[in-house]
Amino acid sequence: MGYTTTFDGIFHLNKRLLDSEAIYLLEFSRTRRMKRNPAILQSIPDSAREAVGLPVGEEGCYFVNEKWDEDSEVSVVDYNRPPKTQPGLWCKWIPTADGGGIKWSGVEKFYDYVEWLQYLIDNFLKPWGYVLNGEVNWQGEREEDIGTIVVARNLIILPEGAQELLRYAVSPVSVPKFVWDCFKTMEATGFSLRDWKEVIDKAVELGHGEAALWIKPNFDKYFDGMERGFEFEGEVMETQDEDL
């Protein structure tokens, strides 16, 4: 199951990473990025993170000492949701052996790879004083799924719109007013949005036919919204864990 993309090439840094930075990025890649309770994490040893001066972060986004929590998972709020600032559950960009670049870890089924590269630049590499350049080619399972990621001075030139891709990946999904009104009505009655077929039937029953017609052509937005919430004119409706 899933979809595998392979990558060929290395992004080069203007100077080598400090050992502490390289170790942190390796641990970051090895750790499933799960929504956690930061209050619990405050008292938990996390030497790799502490060595680079990072806080626990929103929803535990910078925490990497997963070995502490691998049995009880007491800090985990949602195993299948990343912290709200991160685009997915796994980041498979890692430092090269000499610390002079960033490459693919070789682990299959790496999703949101452009968004993750943008995240690394914004949150680690650029703040630490590094400049990333280079080209990496990708090849998906489908023959036509092929392309190149081009980075020049910390700017992802190709594919275009990397910053917007990351922004979309970590933001609630904007929906039209007629969809918003429908979902808010369902929320008020305690109706779960988990099953899209039942949602369509319920929308029709409630007289929201236009919203019912919106769902199928917008499956990507619907399921993204189920993970990150729906938004209309600045107001956000977050889905509950039991909806997933």
Image (cartoon, rainbow, N blue to C red):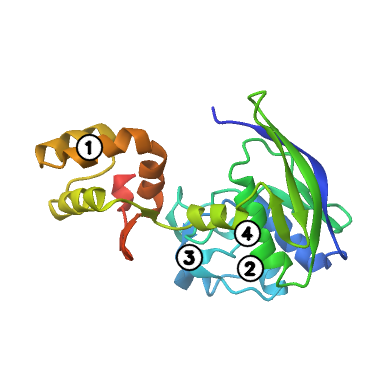
Real-space CA distance between mark 3 and mark 1, rounded to the nearest whole angstrom: 33 Å
Say which amino acid is labelled 4.
Answer: Tyr
Q: Which residue is mark 3?
A: 59
Instruction: Find the distance from the CA under tag 1 to the CA under tag 2.
Output: 47 Å
Q: Which mark is residue 119?
A: 4
Q: CA distance from mark 4 to mark 2?
A: 21 Å
Three-letter residue code for mark 1 = Ala
The residue that disc 2 covers is 46
Q: Above or below — where is 94 with respect to 223?
A: below
In the current view of this chain or complex, which residue is farthest to the top?
Answer: 143
Neighbourhood count class around disc 1 (C-alpha, 10 Å): few under 14, some 14–19, many 20 upward: many
The disc, 1 or 2, on the residue closer to the chain's N-terminal end is 2
Which amino acid is tagged 2?
Asp
Q: Which residue is pictured at 32% across the width and 33% down the height? A: 216
Nearest-to-viewer mark from 3 and 1: 1
- Disc 4 vs disc 1: Cβ atoms closer than 8 Å? no
Secondary element at tag 1: helix
The C terminus: image quadrant: top left
Residue 151 vs residue 225: left or right?
right
Quick check: can you spot residue 82?
no
Label 3 is placed on what type of residue? Glu
User: Mark 1 = which residue?
Assistant: 212
Image: 103 above or below 197: below
- First in sequence: mark 3 or mark 1? 3
Q: Check residue 82 in the rendering and tell me which mark sits there, or answer none.
A: none
- The image quadrant that residue 164 belongs to is bottom right
Quote the CA–CA distance across marks 4 and 1. 35 Å
Residue density around tag 3, few if under 14, some if 14–19, many if 20 or more, within 10 Å: many
Label 2 element class? loop
